[in-house]
Image: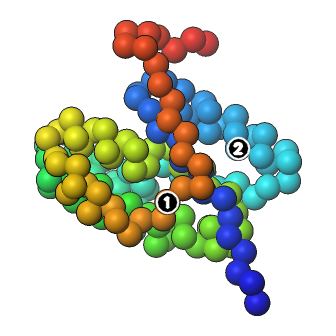
Amino acid sequence: MTQRRGLFITVDGPSGVGKTTTINALAEEMTESGLAIRRTAEPSSNPIGTFTRQNADGVHGHALACLVAADRYAHIEHEIGPWLRAGDTVLCDRYVASTLVLQRLDGVPLPYLLALNADIVLPDLAVILTASPGSSPTA
């Protein structure tokens, strides 16, 4: 028996660039096309993700990188992986690209971040939204 695998799409970018708006538009369009869509975000709504979100201002560097990676692995185990195996399309608001940018800015070495994320599920499509510094989102 062949196991179905859904499509995994991630959307990363700075705050306010339109990640959620883009994911909502994609989800609507794909749902209208008959695809089963699952929306999610990182940090996840799992206990590790909730803890990470609540403590992100007080935890930095290597410790925060470890929390983010732990949440990502739990997210894959409990949500992303099962949904993909069921054949669903998963749209994720923030994923590894955000980690590589934000945690590098926090002083965590790239080899360390890559090692922490070595066993993640890679997206089929990674979309990175950008904006000019100081630009404001348009309505």
- Residue 8 point in image, percent of width and height: 60, 57
Q: Residue furthest front?
A: 111
Name the residue: 54% across, 55% down.
123
Residue 55 in view: no
Amino acid type of disc 1?
Answer: Leu
User: Which quarter of the figure has residue 105?
Assistant: top left
The answer for how far apart the CA atoms under marks 2 and 1 are is 20 Å
Q: What residue is shown with label 2?
A: 27
Horizontally, residue 88 falls left or right of residue 72, namely: right
Name the residue: 44% across, 33% down.
13
Q: Is residue 14 above or below residue 93?
A: above
- Indicate which disc residue 52 carries: none
Amino acid type of disc 2?
Answer: Ala
- Residue 59 point in image, percent of width and height: 14, 47
Q: Is residue 122 above or below residue 109?
A: below
- Residue 52 point in image, percent of width and height: 27, 52
Q: Is residue 72 above or below residue 17?
A: below
Horizontally, residue 21 falls left or right of residue 110, namely: right
Name the residue: 54% across, 70% down.
81
- Where does the C terminus fall, quadrant-wise? top right
Q: What residue is shown with label 1?
A: 122
Q: Secondary structure at mark 2?
A: helix
Name the residue: 46% across, 72% down.
77
